[in-house]
């Protein structure tokens, strides 16, 4: 009987140990995997730190380049203001030169027609006295010197115009070149920064995945440990119960053995039933599944790009100087820049809008009050533009005449300027054609 009980105990112990061993092995294996995940996470953190350091270094470079760009933009604003001032000065000089040129040519024609040298001799001979003759000679000398000074001033003004134009164009070219170089640097650094940001995001995603895997492994480890504890507890309970029965039987007296022999079959059956109920099985959890649906919407947008070319045409019917090859040196976003961009034949250095009439006349263009398609309309400083708004009180305004309607005496113009929603144009407007100055090509 004792042998049967001990055999049952050994069988139960071996069975429970066999169940517990896989749990212990699984827990050890999970520990190894968790350690590997920790190493992977630490490596990813190191790569992220390195990427972040490179991003910060690039951000510092980008900030430095942005400061240079901002400084350059400030210089360009100052240059634009200087250019406008220079444009006005050049226009004034050109008008003055044109007027002086007419005066010099008139004096030359008078000298050839009237014989100016003879007039000088007659003036001396007709003097009433020596002092009168000296006075007349002095007066004649003053006139001659004045004419010489006039010619010299004419040459100086012309030279000043040429020098100012060259200086202005050199500054604009230099600023454009510098701005392009800085913008290229800025774009390059921004591209590198974007690449590092992508790298940083990728590493963060990998780290999150690794940490998620680690969390799963930790959960598996906890489940394995719990199963191990449960099995060991069952093993302990199963091993302790038969030992207690054996000890009791060893202490029984000889008289009791007789009674025990009569109940041997029932005791043996009870012992086997007790050992068979000592084993426990791990419950199996049925996984649940779910489905998730998502929907997306696609939106489309359309944009319209206005044309910058006016509908009017330009026909040559005058003898003005064609400036089509001179380029557009006016400040971008100004009314003068827009008109020059759509009518390249206008002067490059005609000054502010209110100066264009005099500048165009000096260049040989027909300037009058007759409206026509393809002409440039000039608004004086502070002049009303069709009763809808007022030109600048200092600089005036210019626009391009797209069309002229003779039946109701109106013009449709296109224009640019800082006061419009699109400073670079075109901004269309229909106004009365009366009361304005027109420059005809």
Image (tube, rainbow, N blue to C red):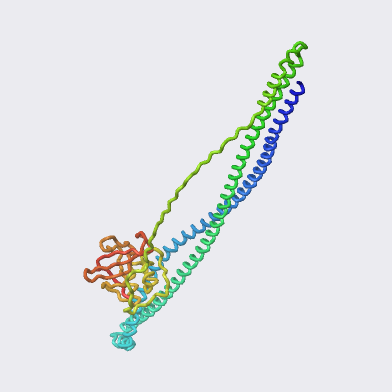
Above or below for 322 versus 426: below
**Is residue 22 toward the left or the right of residue 321 in the image?**
right
Q: Is residue 268 above or below residue 208?
A: above
Where does the image place residue 196, in percent across and percent down from the top left? 57, 53
In-image side of 246 versus 346 (left or right): right
Which residue is found at the position 53% from the left and 63% from the top? 181
**In front here: 210 or 416?**
210
Quarter of the image where the C terminus is located: bottom left
In the image, what residue occupies the spot 70% across and 31% down? 15
Residue 276 sits in which quadrant? top right
Q: Position of residue 77 (x, y in %)?
A: 44, 61
Whole-percent x, y for residue 384 in the image: 27, 63
Q: Quadrant of residue 422?
A: bottom left
Q: State the image coordinates of residue 353 (x, y, percent, origin top left).
A: 34, 67
Task: Farthest residue to the left: give it.
Answer: 407
Residue at the top extreme, as displayed: 255
Q: Give the vertical position of 216 relative to 14 (above or below).
A: below
Question: Based on the displayed image, in which of its 4 quarters is residue 219 positioned?
Answer: top right
- Is 411 in front, or is 89? 411
Task: Decide which of 31, 157 is in the foreground and name it.
Answer: 31
Q: Name the image quarter holding the N terminus.
A: top right
| Residue 120 seen in render | no
């Amino acid at each position: 009987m004792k042998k049967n009980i001990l055999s049952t105990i050994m069988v139960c112990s071996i069975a429970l140990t066999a169940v517990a061993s896989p749990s212990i092995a699984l827990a050890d294996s999970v520990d190894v995997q968790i350690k590997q995940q920790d190493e992977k996470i630490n490596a990813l953190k190191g790569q992220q730190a390195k990427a972040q350091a490179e991003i910060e270094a690039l951000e510092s470079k980008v900030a430095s380049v942005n400061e240079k760009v901002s400084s350059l933009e400030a210089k360009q604003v100052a240059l634009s203001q200087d250019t406008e001032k220079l444009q006005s000065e050049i226009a004034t000089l050109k008008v003055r030169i044109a007027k002086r040129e007419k005066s010099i040519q008139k004096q030359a024609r008078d000298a050839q027609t009237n014989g100016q040298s003879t007039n000088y001799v007659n003036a001396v001979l007709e003097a009433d006295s020596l002092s009168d003759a000296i006075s007349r000679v002095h007066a004649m000398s003053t006139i001659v010197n004045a004419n010489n000074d006039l010619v010299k001033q004419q040459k100086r003004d012309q030279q000043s115009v040429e020098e100012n134009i060259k200086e202005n164009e050199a500054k604009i070219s230099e600023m454009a070149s510098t701005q392009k170089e800085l913008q290229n640097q800025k774009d390059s650094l921004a591209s590198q920064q974007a690449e590092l940001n992508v790298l940083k995001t990728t590493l963060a995603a990998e780290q999150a995945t690794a940490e998620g895997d680690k969390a799963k492994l930790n959960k598996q480890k906890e489940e394995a440990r719990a199963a191990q504890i449960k099995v060991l507890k069952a093993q302990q309970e199963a091993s302790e119960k038969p030992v207690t029965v054996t000890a009791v039987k060893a202490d029984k007296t000889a008289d009791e053995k007789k009674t025990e022999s009569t109940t041997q079959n029932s005791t043996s059956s009870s012992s086997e039933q007790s050992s068979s109920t000592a084993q426990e099985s791990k419950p199996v959890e049925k996984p649940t599944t779910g489905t998730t649906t998502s929907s997306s919407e696609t939106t489309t947008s359309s944009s319209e790009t206005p044309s910058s070319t006016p509908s009017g045409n330009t026909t040559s019917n005058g003898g003005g100087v064609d400036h089509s090859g001179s380029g557009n040196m006016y400040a971008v976003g100004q009314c003068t820049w827009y008109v020059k961009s759509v009518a390249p034949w206008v002067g490059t250095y005609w000054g502010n809008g209110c100066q264009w009439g005099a500048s165009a006349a000096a260049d040989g263009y027909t300037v009058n009050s007759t409206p026509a398609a393809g002409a440039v309309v000039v608004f004086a400083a502070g002049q009303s533009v069709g009763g809808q708004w007022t030109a600048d009180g200092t600089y005036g305004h210019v626009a391009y005449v797209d069309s002229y309607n003779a039946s109701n005496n109106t013009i449709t113009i296109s224009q640019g300027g800082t006061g419009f929603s699109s400073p670079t144009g075109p901004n269309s407007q229909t106004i009365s054609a009366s009361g304005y100055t027109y420059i005809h090509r």
